[in-house]
Amino acid sequence: MFWSFVALSLMQASGATNTPPLFELRWDVPCRPAPDVGDLVGNATGRAEVRATGDEHGWTLQVLVFDPQRSQRQLEVQTCEQAAEAALLIVRIAARGQPAPRVPRRSPAQPVAAEPDVLAPSTPPRLSVALSAIAVQGQLPVFVGRVALSLGLRWASSWEALLALRTGAPVSIEGGPAPNARVVVKPILGGQLSACLLPSIGRLSVGPCAVASAAVWEVRGQNVTSPRVSSAGWLSAGLDARGALRLWEGLSLTLAVGARVVMLRPSASFQDSTPSFESSLTAAEGELGIRWVW
């Protein structure tokens, strides 16, 4: 009886000794569920915290390892998936008691081989395309509606350049030598170039843009004895306040309002009559659109 008790006590003590404590991992990566700790680090012991935040412009990964060797790493990557893969690699290596991997610094005497993309600290430029509806006041005597297709290039997480091509439906303006005489203005092609500073605050990017706009129109008389057709140009510069709200990864709602100073003011007139219209010295516009980023 005594030996049985001793054997049972030894077995219980041996089982308690051979059961390693679990590796404690706190995981906050929106695009990836927490991994199975046993599959990730095996029987290693320790504690770590992982957190990834960002939007379509880039993601920031923070990994804090408490045990077995205290270390902290922060990486800038392009997507949430890249942040998750980098976090798994860092935790797996740190759980072995080794320091979490660093991005090496280049020295003149010893070139360093390129690191895998998943650990690259910089965010590459990103392209975007947007489709927008625009309302303009001051370009003509009436409100003018336009549609625009824009191409964008974003770099360094905040700077963005936009090139927009614009067109729209013809506009009829009353005026001329006869009571029912009119001038029809048909947009041929318009363009706008914008340089913006749009820092991100969570899901929102907002900031100022410097803007230059140009347009070419076809102008013709209507309801007159000898209608004529000519062309006219419009040129302006100004500032916009622009914002983008991320709806989900890669897709954003955009909004912009701005003011323009007109440098080339087109006008139209009939022979031996006062001008039917002339563009204003200033103009204002608002824009609402949807943007895809990749």
Image (tube, rainbow, N blue to C red):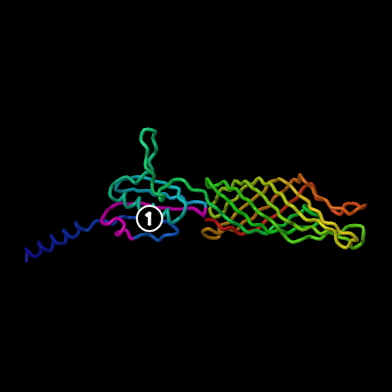
Residue 63 versus residue 222 in the image, above or below: above
Magenta stretch: includes residue 46:
yes
x and y percentages locating residue 146 in the rendered image: 71, 58
**Relative to the observer, which residue lies in front, 85 or 109?**
109
**Relative to the observer, which residue lies in front, 56 or 72?**
56
Q: Is residue 78 left or right of residue 186?
A: left
Magenta stretch: includes residue 57:
no
Q: Which of the 4 image quadrants contains residue 263?
A: top right
Q: Quadrant of the N terminus?
A: bottom left
Mark 1 Cα within 10 Å, few/some/many (few <14, many 20+)?
few
Q: Which of the 4 image quadrants contains residue 80?
A: bottom left
The furthest residue to the bottom: 1
x and y percentages locating residue 270 in the rendered image: 89, 54
Kindly identify the amino acid type of the residue bearing the numbered disc 1: Arg
Q: Is residue 148 left or right of residue 27?
A: right
x and y percentages locating residue 110 in the rendered image: 35, 35
Q: Is residue 69 left or right of residue 138?
A: left
Q: Residue at x 70, y 49 (%)?
A: 213
Span colored in magenta = 36-56
State how many labels appear. Answer: 1
Q: Residue at x 89, y 59 (%)?
A: 226
x and y percentages locating residue 235 in the rendered image: 74, 47
| Mark 1 element type | strand
Q: Is residue 135 left or right of residue 60?
A: right
Residue for badge 1 = 26
